[in-house]
Amino acid sequence: IGIPVFNTPGANANAVKELVLCGMLLGSRRVVDGVNHMKELGAQGLARERVEKDKSMFGGRELAGKKLAVIGLGHIGSATARDAMALGMDVSG
């Protein structure tokens, strides 16, 4: 019988673009590292006293001014490039 496969061009392009941009923001701002750090401090009972001191460890970097190379400018690539430019990124592709 096999596995049915469907071609739905552009159907999930916006969702994928949002996940790409989310990944860039999470990575550039070290959000996951900061959350994990605070969970560890919370488990040790140190979160309140260390939050101000430790927050500088996770400042990260702005995306504005950074270069993004997009490979393929179909539905997903072009939407990602457009939104990355709106964030001030230098986009090539």
Image (tube, rainbow, N blue to C red):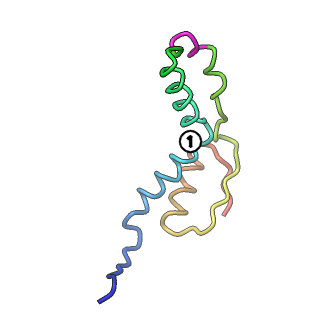
- Which residue is drawn at the image coordinates 56% and 46% (left, top)? 86
**61 in relation to 93, above or below:** above
User: Which residue occupies the foreground of this view, 82 or 26?
Assistant: 26
Between 86 and 44, the one nearer to me in the picture = 44
Instruction: State the residue at coordinates (68%, 50%).
Output: 90
From this viewpoint, which residue is outermost toward the left? 1
Magenta segment? 48-52
The residue beneath circle 1 is: 25
Task: Please check the rendered image and state whether residue 4 is part of the magenta-colored stretch, yes or no.
Answer: no
> Is residue 49 located in the magenta-colored stretch of the structure?
yes
The residue positioned farthest toward the bottom in the image shown: 1
Give percent across and percent down for residue 19: 47, 52
Quadrant of res 78: bottom right
Q: Is residue 70 above or below residue 47?
A: below
Estimate the x, y position of residue 52 in percent, counting from the top left: 59, 14
Q: Residue at x 48, y 20 (%)?
A: 42
Mark 1 neighbour class, 10 Å CA radius: few under 14, some 14 to 19, many 20 or more: some
Question: As shown in the figure, which amino acid type bears the numbered disc 1?
Answer: Leu
